[in-house]
C-alpha cells in the first residue's frame, strides 16, 4: 500500500497517489478496481501516469471535474481507464489535450491488463494514441510498458501466407491457422494471461492445440515481413501442430525454412522478464513440469538436436564447467538435457543411449543416471538419488529417477504440440515463477484492409489521420466481418 496524497478538486473530484500512478476519482474515494490497477502499474519515465477512476460513459461535467483534478504541470499524461470496461471514446482524450494544452497518451480500444502489460486490442488500429492540441492523433504502439519491438508489424491482425493469420498478443504475435473463433478462445486466453512481455524479445507463438496444423510456409511468409532487427531478436514458442516432413524436428526445419539461426523454447515461458520459467506443454494445451532446458538454437543445415541456449541450473552453488554441465562430485557431472538432468561420469562425452535426444515428457522431468557401465551404475544411482533429494519440493515431486538404459528404443522425435529437441548446452539461466492468472477474452479482432483508415475521424468527425505504416509483401484479406478469422 502506497497511499501518499489525496487532493480534492474543485468539483468534488480528488486525486490520490497509489504506487507509480495518480488516481483521479470522485469524492467518495478510489474504487477497488482502480486501486488494484494502480497498484499493478510500473512507473512511466516519460509521462505522468494517471488512472481515470471514472465510468467509461460519463457526462461532460464529469470530465470537466476530472480535468480540474489532474496534476498541474507541463509534462504529458498517460491516462489509463480505471473502471470496466476499460474503453473510452477517443474524442474525450482529444478534448482533454485541447483543454489542458499538454500531450495526452491514451488507449484507443479496450485496455487489458495481461501478464503485467497494458495491452490495447479490440478494434481495427487499436493501440496507444498520442493526442496533442492542434495536432493529428498518432498511433504509438500497443503495449505498456512498451518493449523495443512494439511496432506495427506485430500489432495488427493480418494474413500470414496463404492459410495463416498473425494475431497480436501482449508478448508478441500468434501465428495460427485460419479457423473458427470458438476453437481459438481457450488458447488466446491462456497465451495472453501466461506469456510474459519481454522488453527486448518478441515471442512468436506457432499453432493452435487441437486444430489444423500451421504450414511452415506461412511462418516463412510472415517472417519475411519483419524488420531484420526484430526477426533477429525473436524467439519461437510452439503451441500446436505444424506441417513437417516425416522425421523432421520442429526447430531445425524452421531454421532451414527461414534461412537463419533461430531460438525456440522447449515449452511455454511463464513468470516475469526477470524471473522466467518454462513449463512443458501438454497435448490439451495445459501446462506441465518446469523444464531445466528452456530453449535451443538451430542454424540452417545444422544438427537436428540444436544447441542449448537457455536453461536453469539444477541447484544453486554448483560450478558450471561447460554450458549446462555442472560438477556434482569429484568424478561426476550433471548435464542439463531436454528431458531433464543427466548424471554421468565426468570423463564421458559419448551418449550411447540417446539421452541428449530424449524429448521432454510434459508431466515429468527425468533425472537420468548413466547405467551403461554396470561397474559404476550402482554408485551413480545413489548419487542421483541424493541429487533428487536436494531439489526443491515442487521440482522433486515432478521428477522421475531412472537409468539411462531405460531410454533404449524411446522415440527421439518431437511430437505435436511439444517444442524443439536438445543438446550441446550454453550459458545458464536461473529463473522460476508461477504463471499469471485469470484469463479474459482478448478479442482477436483488429482485422485490417488495404486503405488508409481515418478511424479517429469516424468517431470524432473532426480529425483525420492516416493508418500506421503497414508491412510490405502482405496482402490483408478482408472477409467483411470482424472476428471471423
Image (cartoon, grey):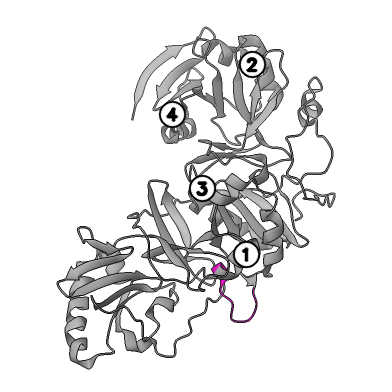
Q: Looking at the image, is mark 2 or mark 1 earlier in the sequence?
A: 2
What residue sits 57% from the left and 16% below the top?
66
Q: Looking at the image, is mark 4 or mark 3 earlier in the sequence?
A: 4
What residue sits 52% from the left and 74% below the top?
304
Q: Which mark is residue 43?
A: 4
Q: Which residues are magenta?
A: 244-251
On the image, the x and y values in percent for residue 224 come to: 69, 53
User: Is residue 244 toward the left or the right of residue 398 in the image?
Assistant: right
Q: For the residues carrying marks 4 and 3, which lies nearer the camera in this image? A: 3
**Callout 1: helix, strand or loop?**
loop
On the image, the x and y values in percent for residue 136 come to: 73, 20
Tag 3: Cα neighbours inside 10 Å, few (<14), some, or many (≥20)? some
**Callout 2: helix, strand or loop?**
helix
User: Is residue 51 toward the left or the right of residue 470 in the image?
Assistant: left
Q: For the residues carrying marks 2 and 4, which lies nearer the camera in this image? A: 4
On the image, the x and y values in percent for residue 393 come to: 25, 65
Q: Which quadrant holds residue 379?
A: bottom left
Tag 1: Cα neighbours inside 10 Å, few (<14), some, or many (≥20)? many
Is residue 187 or residue 82 the one in the foreground?
187
How far is mark 4 from mark 3, CA to CA? Answer: 21 Å
**Callout 4: helix, strand or loop?**
loop
Tag 2: Cα neighbours inside 10 Å, few (<14), some, or many (≥20)? many
Image quarter where the N terminus lies is top left
- The residue singled out by tag 2 in the image is 96
- The residue singled out by tag 3 in the image is 201
Q: Looking at the image, is mark 2 or mark 4 earlier in the sequence?
A: 4
Q: Looking at the image, is mark 2 or mark 3 earlier in the sequence?
A: 2
Amino acid at each position: 500500500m502506497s497511499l501518499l496524497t489525496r487532493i480534492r478538486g474543485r468539483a468534488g473530484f480528488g486525486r490520490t497517489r497509489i504506487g507509480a500512478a495518480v488516481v483521479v476519482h470522485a469524492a467518495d474515494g478510489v474504487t477497488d478496481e482502480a486501486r488494484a490497477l494502480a497498484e499493478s502499474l510500473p512507473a512511466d519515465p516519460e509521462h505522468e501516469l494517471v488512472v481515470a477512476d471514472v465510468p467509461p460513459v460519463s457526462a461532460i461535467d464529469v470530465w470537466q471535474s476530472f480535468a480540474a483534478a489532474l496534476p498541474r504541470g507541463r509534462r504529458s499524461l498517460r491516462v489509463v481507464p480505471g473502471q470496466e470496461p476499460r474503453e473510452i471514446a477517443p474524442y474525450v482524450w482529444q478534448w482533454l489535450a485541447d483543454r489542458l494544452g499538454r500531450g495526452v497518451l491514451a488507449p484507443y480500444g479496450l485496455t487489458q491488463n495481461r501478464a503485467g502489460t497494458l495491452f490495447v486490442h479490440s478494434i481495427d488500429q487499436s493501440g496507444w494514441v498520442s493526442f496533442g492540441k492542434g495536432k493529428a492523433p498518432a498511433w504509438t504502439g500497443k503495449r505498456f510498458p512498451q518493449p523495443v519491438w512494439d511496432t506495427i508489424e506485430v500489432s495488427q491482425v493480418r494474413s500470414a501466407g496463404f492459410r495463416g493469420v498473425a494475431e497480436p498478443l501482449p508478448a508478441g504475435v500468434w501465428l495460427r491457422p485460419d479457423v473458427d473463433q470458438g476453437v481459438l478462445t481457450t488458447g488466446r486466453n491462456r497465451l495472453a494471461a501466461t506469456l510474459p512481455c519481454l522488453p527486448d524479445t518478441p515471442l512468436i507463438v506457432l499453432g493452435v492445440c487441437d486444430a489444423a496444423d500451421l504450414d511452415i510456409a506461412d511462418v516463412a511468409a510472415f517472417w519475411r515481413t519483419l524488420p531484420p532487427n526484430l526477426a533477429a531478436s525473436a524467439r519461437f514458442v510452439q503451441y500446436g501442430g505444424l506441417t513437417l516432413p516425416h522425421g523432421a524436428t520442429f526447430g531445425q526445419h524452421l531454421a532451414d525454412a527461414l534461412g537463419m539461426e533461430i531460438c525456440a523454447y522447449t515449452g511455454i515461458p511463464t513468470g516475469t522478464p526477470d524471473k522466467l520459467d518454462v513449463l512443458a506443454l501438454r497435448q490439451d494445451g495445459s501446462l506441465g513440469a518446469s523444464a531445466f532446458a528452456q530453449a535451443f538454437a538451430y542454424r540452417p543445415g545444422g544438427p537436428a538436436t540444436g544447441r542449448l541456449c537457455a536453461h536453469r541450473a539444477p541447484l544453486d552453488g554448483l560450478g558450471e564447467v561447460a554450458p549446462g554441465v555442472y560438477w556434482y562430485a569429484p568424478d561426476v557431472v550433471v548435464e542439463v538435457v531436454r528431458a531433464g538432468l543427466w548424471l554421468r561420469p565426468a570423463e564421458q562425452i559419448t551418449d550411447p543411449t540417446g539421452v541428449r535426444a530424449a524429448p521432454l515428457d510434459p508431466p515429468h522431468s527425468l533425472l537420468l543416471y548413466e547405467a551403461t557401465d554396470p561397474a559404476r551404475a550402482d554408485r551413480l544411482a545413489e548419487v542421483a538419488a541424493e541429487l533428487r533429494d536436494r531439489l526443491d519440493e515442487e521440482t522433486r515431486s515432478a521428477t522421475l529417477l531412472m537409468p539411462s538404459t531405460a531410454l533404449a528404443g524411446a522415440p527421439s522425435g518431437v511430437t505435436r504440440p511439444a517444442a524443439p529437441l536438445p543438446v550441446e548446452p550454453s550459458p545458464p539461466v536461473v529463473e522460476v515463477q508461477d504463471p499469471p492468472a485469470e484469463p479474459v477474452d482478448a478479442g482477436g479482432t483488429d482485422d485490417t484492409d488495404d486503405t488508409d483508415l481515418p478511424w479517429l475521424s469516424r468517431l470524432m468527425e473532426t480529425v483525420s489521420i492516416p493508418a500506421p505504416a503497414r508491412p510490405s509483401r502482405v496482402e490483408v484479406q478482408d472477409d467483411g466481418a470482424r472476428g471471423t478469422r
